[in-house]
Image (spheres, rainbow, N blue to C red):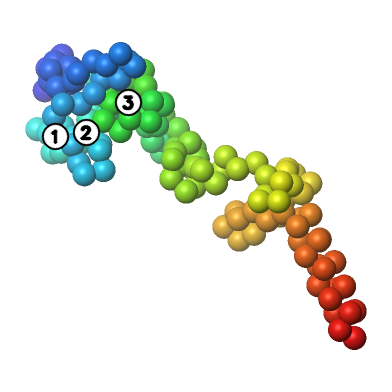
């Protein structure tokens, strides 16, 4: 199938919104992503087909991030190739929300000096750790 045929199939299944999204009116998965039946490859995510049709190949190892946060949008201008890690960081899941936290629950900044990294990249606050150890030592002295 030619790019022109694919382009017309895509544009025939979109509703243009005032936000600039090309809202997919065809089949969607339960997670909200649009699907397009590609006769060569079977069912494919429509935003990937749209990007490849209107922009070009998706670079190896990269994922397409919906800049508009609308999973059913297939507007190539709303899609950006990024690493899987960056895509998760930008998202609304727990990993993305946690990555945007800039201070511990007590308000100490997560910066290069005050942040300790654990296994898997988990962050902990050095200042909170220091205070916790001081309190524990004081309690031990009080008991002794």
Q: How far is disc 2 from disc 1 in space, using C-alphas? A: 6 Å
Checking the image for residue 42, the label placed there is: none
Task: Determine crowd level at label 1: few under 14, some 14-19, many 20+ residues with C-alpha closer than 10 A.
Answer: some
Residue topped by disc 3: 57
When the figure is inspected, residue 60 is found, relative to residue 116, above or below; the finding is: above
Q: How far is disc 1 from disc 3 in space, using C-alphas? A: 23 Å
Q: Earlier in the sequence, mark 1 or mark 3?
A: 1
Q: How far is disc 2 from disc 3 in space, using C-alphas? A: 19 Å
Task: Determine crowd level at label 3: few under 14, some 14-19, many 20+ residues with C-alpha closer than 10 A.
Answer: few
Q: Earlier in the sequence, mark 2 or mark 1?
A: 1
CB contact under 8 Å: marks 2 and 1: yes
Checking the image for residue 27, the label placed there is: 1
In depth, the one of 120 and 129 nearer the eye is 129
The quarter of the image holding the N terminus is: top left
**Residue at image x 61%, y 61%?**
119
Q: Secondary structure at mark 3?
A: loop
**Residue at image x 89%, y 79%?**
142
Q: Give the number of the mark in front: 2 or 3.
A: 2
The quadrant holding residue 16 is top left
- How far across and how far down the image is residue 114, in percent? 77, 49
Q: Earlier in the sequence, mark 2 or mark 3?
A: 2
Residue topped by disc 2: 34
- How far across and how far down the image is residue 80, in percent? 41, 26
CB contact under 8 Å: marks 2 and 3: no
- How far across and how far down the image is residue 138, in percent? 87, 73
CB contact under 8 Å: marks 1 and 3: no
**Residue at image x 90%, y 79%?**
141
Q: Secondary structure at mark 2?
A: loop
Please give left or right for residue 128 compared with residue 27 in the image: right
């Amino acid at each position: 199938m030619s790019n022109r045929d694919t382009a017309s199939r895509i544009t025939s299944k979109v509703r243009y919104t005032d936000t600039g999204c090309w809202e997919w009116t065809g089949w969607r998965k339960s997670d909200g992503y649009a699907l397009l039946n590609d006769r060569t490859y079977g069912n494919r995510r429509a935003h990937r087909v749209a990007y490849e049709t209107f922009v070009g190949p998706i670079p190896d190892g990269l994922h397409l991030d919906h800049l508009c946060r609308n999973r059913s949008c297939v507007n190539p201008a709303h899609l950006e190739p990024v690493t899987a890690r960056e895509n998760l960081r930008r998202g609304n899941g727990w990993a993305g929300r946690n990555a945007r936290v800039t201070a511990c629950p007590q308000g100490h900044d997560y910066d290069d000096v005050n942040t300790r990294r654990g296994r898997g990249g988990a962050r902990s606050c050095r200042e909170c750790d220091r205070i916790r150890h001081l309190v524990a030592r004081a309690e031990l002295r009080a008991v002794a």
